[in-house]
Image: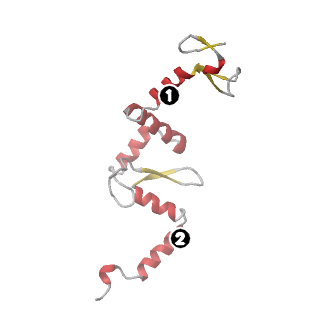
């Protein structure tokens, strides 16, 4: 028998999930209470959950706070640092661009520009090669008919 730390009811051990991080090897909350806790915490329709998740991702992945993100956004006038487009469509926020070697945040980019840099593997020589290729290849409007 084990007592649930949330509801305080003593229940058989089979009513608790396994949890290797606990000394007893069992979750401190019974399955019913744990299920209710998760439903409350992971409510995707809840704006607080989405904002909390966003705040946690910014801090964990890029080492910046929401306030620092907002400061960068303000410095860039709310638009992509490369193309000048605001966030649009299903992408409600600009992506945090960072140096993958140092982790240093470089700026905020729209999804297209962020993906372009990623597909070029943040390699300056590949970017230069792409520019050279585009200069030697006529664009659609320059092709004579």
Q: Is residue 65 left or right of residue 83?
A: right
Near-viewer residue (107 or 61): 61
Q: Position of residue 129 (x, y in %)?
A: 50, 75
Could you say where residue 123 lies in the image, as x and y percent from the top left? 55, 65
Task: State the SS at label 2.
Answer: helix
Q: Nearer the viewer, residue 111 or 15?
A: 15
Give the SS element for disc 1.
Answer: helix
Question: Residue pushed farthest top?
Answer: 9
Number of marks in picture: 2
- Across and down, in percent, residue 95 comes to 43, 50
**Cα distance in 3D space between marks 1 and 2:** 46 Å
Query: Compared to 6, does 92 lie above or below?
Result: below
Q: How far from the left and from the top, in percent, is residue 66?
A: 43, 38
At a point 58% along the width and 19% down the height, the residue shown is 29
Residue behind mark 2: 126
- For label 1, count other residues whose C-alpha is less than 10 Å away and answer few (under 14), some (14-19) or many (20+): few
At 33% across and 57% down in the image, what residue appears? 85
Q: Circle 1 sits on which residue?
A: 38
Q: Is residue 20 above or below residue 6?
A: below
* Extreme residue toward the bottom, this view: 145
Q: Is residue 122 above or below residue 7?
A: below
Which quarter of the rendering shows the N terminus? Answer: top right
Placement of 103 over or under 122, stated as above or below: above
Contact between marks 1 and 2 (CB within 8 A): the answer is: no
């Amino acid at each position: 028998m084990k007592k649930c730390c949330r509801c305080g009811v003593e229940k058989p051990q089979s009513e608790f999930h396994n949890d290797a991080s606990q000394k007893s090897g069992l979750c401190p909350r019974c399955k019913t209470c744990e299920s209710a806790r998760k439903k409350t915490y992971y409510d995707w329709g809840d704006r607080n959950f989405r904002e909390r998740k966003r705040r946690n991702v910014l801090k964990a992945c890029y080492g910046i706070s929401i306030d620092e993100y907002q400061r960068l956004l303000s410095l860039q006038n709310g638009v992509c640092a490369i193309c000048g487009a605001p966030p649009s469509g299903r992408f409600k926020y600009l992506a945090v661009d960072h140096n993958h070697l140092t982790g240093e945040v470089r700026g905020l980019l729209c999804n297209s520009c962020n993906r372009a840099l990623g597909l070029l593997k943040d390699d300056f020589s590949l970017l230069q090669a792409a520019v050279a290729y585009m200069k030697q290849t006529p664009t659609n409007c320059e092709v004579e008919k």
